[in-house]
């Protein structure tokens, strides 16, 4: 694939999930439905990817998802196919339709991310580091890390994919423009859940 990963106007397969995928984060998946087994087979054969959506799409509406590609695969202990998907870029998806197998397809337009200042990234990395450290103490999550967690973008986006947030909250994070805005949104969500005040803007 090129450095742009996916071209504007390209038709891409869609994978509706309850999970959040963001650029530079990874997501482990178990594949068992025939339509998704065929999708994975095609993606690996053609060196292609697919779009992860939060929840089932609706014809006639556009939605923001994350285009990703498969970076690892293998048979799990339960006999199912396991894959790891790396998020590459957010995309807006429109012209949604299903093929004969029941697989959703849509036309994508890659979304540019607003650049983040180094000082703001450092602030949010430090702010969320205790939560990240607590999650990494869990062996299952520690095994999932297939990326370099040193860059703030990778680490903070990975943190967001791990948190058990409601679907509407996950979509808000995916819709947000840029990492700093995403961190502000997450801080407000966690404060709301905890019943405390959010951090001042950074």
Image (cartoon, grey):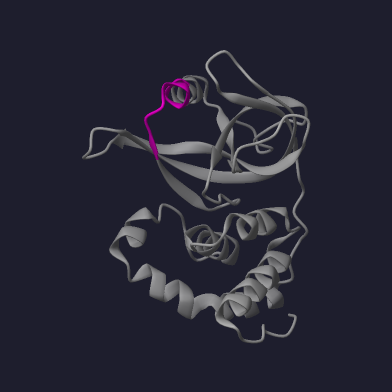
Residue nearest the observer in this picture, 169 or 69: 169
Residue 178's spot in the image, x, y percent?
Answer: 73, 60
Q: Is residue 62 left or right of residue 45?
A: right
**Looking at the picture, how far across and down is residue 106, in whole percent?**
69, 28
In the picture, the quarter occupied by the C terminus is bottom right
- Give, as a single range, the part of the protein colored magenta: 30-38
Q: Residue at x 49, y 20 (%)?
A: 42
- Residue at the extreme left: 77
**Is residue 23 one of those drawn in magenta?**
no
Q: Residue furthest top?
A: 100
Asked if residue 92 can be seen in this view, the reply is yes
| Depth order, front residue of 36/166 | 166
- Above or below, 129 against 8 in this view is below
- Identify the residue shown where x is 66% and y is 43%: 65
Which residue is rendered at x = 55% and y = 64% of the image? 151
Residue 117: image location, x then y, percent: 74, 71
Quarter of the figure with residue 172? bottom right
Residue drawn 56% across and 81% down? 194
Instruction: Tell me residue 81's x, y (percent).
Output: 33, 32
Observer-nearest residue: 201 or 71? Answer: 201
In the picture, the quarter occupied by the N terminus is top right
From the viewer's perspective, is residue 40 above or below residue 76? above
Q: Quadrant of residue 113?
A: bottom right
Residue 135 as seen in the image, left or right of residue 50: left
Q: Is residue 122 visible?
A: no
């Amino acid at each position: 694939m090129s450095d742009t990963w996916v071209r504007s106007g390209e038709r891409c397969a869609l994978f509706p999930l309850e999970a959040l995928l963001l650029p530079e984060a990874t997501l482990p998946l178990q594949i068992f439905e025939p339509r998704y087994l065929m999708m994975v087979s095609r993606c690996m054969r053609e060196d292609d990817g697919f779009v992860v959506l939060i929840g089932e799409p609706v014809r006639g509406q556009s939605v923001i998802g994350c285009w990703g590609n498969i970076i690892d695969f293998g048979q799990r202990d339960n006999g199912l196919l396991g894959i790891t998907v790396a998020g590459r870029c957010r995309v807006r998806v429109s012209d949604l339709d299903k093929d004969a197998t029941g697989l959703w397809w849509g036309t994508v337009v890659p979304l540019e991310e607003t650049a983040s200042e180094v000082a703001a990234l450092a602030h949010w990395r430090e702010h969320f580091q205790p939560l990240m450290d607590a999650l990494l103490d869990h062996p299952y999550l520690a095994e999932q890390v297939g990326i370099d967690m040193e860059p703030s973008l990778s680490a903070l986006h990975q943190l967001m994919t791990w948190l058990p947030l409601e679907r509407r909250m996950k979509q808000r994070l995916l819709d947000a423009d840029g990492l700093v805005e995403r961190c502000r949104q997450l801080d407000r969500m966690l404060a709301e859940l905890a019943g405390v005040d959010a951090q001042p803007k950074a």
